Every structure is written in C-alpha cells, then in structure tokens.
Amino acid sequence: MSATVPSAVGSPLARLEGPLKVTGAAKYAAEYPQDDIAYGWIVPSPVPRGRLIDVITDPTDDAVAVLWHGNAPEIAAADDPELAVLQSERISYRGQPVALVVADTLEAARYAARTLRLEIEAEEHDAVLRIDHPDLYTPEKVNPAFPAESMMGDPDQEVLVDVVYSTPALHNNPMEPHATIARWDGDQLTVFDSNQHPSGIAATLGQVFGVENVRVITEHVGGGFGSKGTARPNAVLAALAAKVTGRPVKVVVTRQQMFSIVGHRTPTVQRIRLGADRDGTMTVIDHQAYSQSSRLLEFAEQTAVSTRHMYAAPNRRTGHHLVRLDMPTPRWMRAPGEAPGMFALECAVDELAAELGMDPIELRIRNEPSAEPESGTPFTSRHYVDCLRQGAERFGWAGRDPRPRQRREGDWWIGTGVAGATYPTMAQPSAARVSALPDGRFEVAIGAADLGTGARTILTQIAADALGVGVDRIAIRIGDSSLPQASVAGGSSGSASWGWAVTGACRALRENGGDQAVFDTTELIEQQEKDGRHAFGAHFAEVRVDAVTGEVRVSRLFGMYTAGRILNPRTARSQFLGGMIMGMGMALHEEGVLDPAFGEWVNNDLAGYHIPAHADVEEIDAAWLDEHDEQINPMGSKGIGEIGIVGSPAAIVNAIWHATGIRVRDLPVRLDKLL
Ligand code: MOS
C-alpha cells in the first residue's frame, strides 16, 4: 500500500459497468434464464372500490394457475398492507392486483388474464383531493418521522402574499419497470428483483413467507426514483406463484400497471402565507399542505418540512392535512415532499419579491437564518447565500429588469427566474466487508444497489483511497442481499451510508492487518445529531414563451449546488442534470390526469404522460461549491440524488411569470394556462 497513489475520490471515473450496459451484457432482474420458468400476468381491479366475489376462467385458456383470494396460500403482510396480495375480497383502488395468471408463456398468461371474468360488487368511491374535503385530518407524523405541525410566534397576522398552489399526481417511470423472478429450492427463496434495497427486500419477503433463507439479487437496476425502495406486489406475487406451481415464476409490471401499483407522487394543494416588512425582512411564514393516501396505508408526505429550514421569520407555522381516498397508495418519488413543497414556497417567495419590488435573490439573502429557524440547531454547513451569489454571477443575473413582460424577441416573451433548493443530508446504518485477495487486489462487498447512478463506481473510488491503492486493485461486489447488509438507495443517502461502511472496513483492514475486516456503522449513525444537516442549491432558468401559442421553451437551466464533497464529478453532474430535467418535467409536462368517475389516471402510458425529451432540453448545466463537511461522515460528502428536482420547477415557473406576467399556480404549466 503506497501513499503516492493519487486520490481516486474527486476524479471523473466512468461507470465501471458502462461497457456491460452498452453491450447488453449487464443482466437486469427479468433476464436471468431459468429452467422450466412460468410467466405471471397481473390482473388489475377494474373498479376503485368493492368486493371481488369470484374469478371465472375461460376453460379453453392455457393457464397453469389462476391465483386469487379464493385459492391463494395465506401470507403475512409484513409492515405493508399492500403486500398482503390476494388475501382479501376488499378492493381498495382501481389497478390493485386482484389475481395472477400463471402460464408457460407470457402470451398465454396475458391471453388468460384478458379472457377471465371478475365477478365484482362495486361500491361508491371517492377519488378527489380537495382543500375542503370533510375527511381531512392531521396525521400524527409525516415521512419519515417528522411532526406534522410546527408553530412559533403568531402567524395569524396580516400578510402580503396569501396564495394556493397545486401539483398533480406524478408517476414513477424508471426506464426498467419493476420485475421479479422468484424460485424456491426447498425453503430457500431466491429472487431476482429490480429494487433499491436488496437487504430490505430480503427481510420483507422473509416476513411475508415466514422463512429465514431469502436471497435477493439486484445486480443492475434501470432506475427507481423511490418506487423501488421497498418490495412491491410483483415480488410477492412471483414468490407466491413459484410456491404454488413449484416452478420459477417471472412477473414483470407493465408500463400501464406502473401508474397504479408501484407508488406515485401524491397530488398536493398548498396554501402559503408570507408577511414581510417593506425592507424585505420576513415576518410570517405559513405553509399548509394537503395531500392524499389510500385506504390501505397511511402515507403522509412531508410537503411542508423543507419550509422549516429555509428562511428566518419570527412568526411561523407548517401543517400537513391528509385524506384517505379510494386511490392507489402514493409513495416516494424523487425528493418526496421537498419537490412539491419547495415548488410552492419558492414561487411564493418570488411573489413576495414582486410585491415588495425587490430582487428575488436579495430577498432570499436578507432572510438567511444563522441557525435552524425553528430548532436553533446550528447548521453543519450551509453556503446557500454563496450558491445564490455565485450562481447569479455564472448565470448572468445582474442588470435583470425585475418587472415582468418587458422583453420580447419576435413572437417570444423572454424571462428569467430563480429558486432555492435544499435536501436533507442523511445516513443510514450499513455494513461492509473488505478482503485481501491472493492476487493483490481487495474485494469490497456490500449489499447496496446501483440504480444507474454510479454507486458501484464511487464505492470503488472510496475504497481505493481508504486502502491507499489504485482503483484497479478494487474488486467491488454489490447488489446481493447475501453480502453485508446495506441501507436503501434512497433519500440521497446511498454514498454517505455505504461509503462510510466501506471506509470503516478499509481502515480497519489497514490498521489491524489480516485478510479481512468488517465494519458496521449502526452505532455511529445512531449517535449522530439529525438536525441541521442539509445540502443546498440555487436554480436559475431562462424561458421563452410564444406569445401566440403559449408554448414554453426552457432556453437555459442552471443549478449551483453546495452538497459536501463531490465524490465523482462525472456521475454527480449526471445526477444533478437528471434531477433538473425531471424538475422541468414537473414544471411543464408531467401530470396524472384523473378521471374521478373511474378513480383512475387516464393517461397511464408514456404516450399520454409526458416527460421531457431531448428536444425539450436546450442549455443545461450544473456547478458546485467546494464544500467538505467533516461533521457528516468520513468522506465529507452530502447527498446529490434528489436536490436537482427541488426548486428547479419553481425557477422555471418564476421565469414564466417574468416573461409573461402570468402566475400559474397549478402545475404543470400547460400552454392553455398562458393564453
Ligand atoms: Mo428517493 S424518493 O428517496 O428513492
């Protein structure tokens, strides 16, 4: 081990598995050949609420088995009622899996699923979130464990801005849909599954089937955004069908089914009240968020929680209001809570700036808190103001006319906008093992998942530095629950959590010698303060809006971040840009269009549900401050996976106002709202 090896962390190492992926050699969950495999096809409920009385199959079909609650073996629900598939006659949402057809071929399974008849007793349903819904209540906690309400001083005084924003249901559509192959060998269950948390899903399936021996293999994953953070019904259905048929069974979720059974971002309605003195000192911040959950599970999104951390003001209040509807359960989608919450807050701050005739960057800087505004906990590092200032410099903000509807070039109105970004910095307990191999290399093993973000690559870089060797001497193994237990690839916490465990194991091997070392971060992380830890950023957008058609083009989008040490500038940039593009989708394109009569989103495919395409993205860039936060973890890093979608929609919507003078408060900004 030599001390002269240059630092691997901080270098733009390309994804190690890149060549495997572009040559098609990388295996995804549905691509592991199995002898005598059978195919499962999920039968979704055609009604949002009712009872399934019977399933009548076509006698001429070639189904091997048709499983439903009338014949499925009993399983336990673990801690997620949605995993109790085929256990009850109750139908809780349209699209809920009510049967699984198993056949020798995919085509036969699909055919049998389409020809069977469901005898259903339908009941009245309620599918619409409203700010005055009579069943709204305040949940005890919002995700992951925040108080639902907070209050300081007297927020019930006169304010300058009092506005209501709304965001639609948004749907997780990773390129690779959820997929599982399950196989039983005696009471050993092996599962190839596309997910964000092999260790967690192995534990969940163990509880559901009451067995100890579960192995989850998740070598490559084509994205997740949060929808693959926990086991989804496809994993349970595949294992159930494999048990019944005694054969390996593959269940792949179709693109249409993705809209109901894997978890979407809840629609929100948000009321924001902001008060300020004429010099821009904020006096009141009040953020009330309304969202929905299903009958099956209380999923309470933390929409207003970021507002507790952003700006100083003596009188403040946040609150969350939830209603349980006959609709699919919302779940995590990239920056769950922060993305819709900061859309509303950062647009409202822009409205306040206009009301005061102040520059929106100066207004934000004037209200920079010296510590957490509600708890008083010091920030480990913040640098939000530096992001605003340096971002403005790079973007070319100086000299901007604050008045809207001033710049026109041909048919285009031109405008610029800014918005703040933040995301909590988290770490979760994980363990890693490092072993010296006879050929001089080191095997680093941890049950983490790489969603395509570059996790495998940065863990290799972290291990190389911790061992003082080059990256070519690291053999990384991830994506398998039989490896040391790792936390979820979620909450922008993967690199911090796993990198910490890997660093610990490598240091232990160096210090103690021997052939192998294992390091578990559980105790260290349990002792850590949770408050006052966030990444920050500022988003800048330039748009042009066609005066005749209302078409919006985002000419420039720029993100300036402060997110701890950047472990790999190439993969980090890609994460930032991906988040910003998803933010563009949230601002302009994405919308689950609800049909209240059927309790479903009618545009449940990628033809009807629009996401930004290459042609929508013009000039886009990300930059970051050189921040090392040693209080956070041994790498000095924060999370970067989600902050790109926080605030970027608001920057675009604020730019649209600056271009046109029109405040659109309900996303997405479709062209009809600008005419
Ligand atoms: Mo992310 S929504 O925490 O996977």
Image: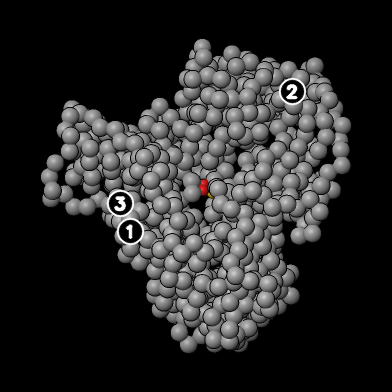
First of labels 1, 3 by sequence position: 1
User: What number of labels is visible?
Assistant: 3
For residue 290, what is the image quadrant? bottom right
For residue 511, what is the image quadrant? top left
Horizontal side of residue 112 vs 336, given as left or right: right
First of labels 2, 1 by sequence position: 2
Image quadrant in which the C terminus is located: bottom right
User: What residue is shown with label 3?
Assistant: 635
Q: Secondary structure at mark 3?
A: loop
Callout 2: CB less than 8 Å from ligand 1:
no
Q: Secondary structure at mark 1?
A: loop
User: What residue is shown with label 1?
Assistant: 629
Q: Amino acid at mark 1?
A: Asp
Q: Residue furthest front?
A: 153
Q: Residues within 10 Å of mark 1 (few under 14, many from 20)?
A: some
Q: Secondary structure at mark 2?
A: loop
Q: Percent x, y for residue 472?
A: 23, 41
Q: Nearer the viewer, residue 207 or 156?
A: 156
Q: Percent x, y for residue 541?
A: 52, 72
Q: Residue at x 30, y 36 (%)?
A: 519
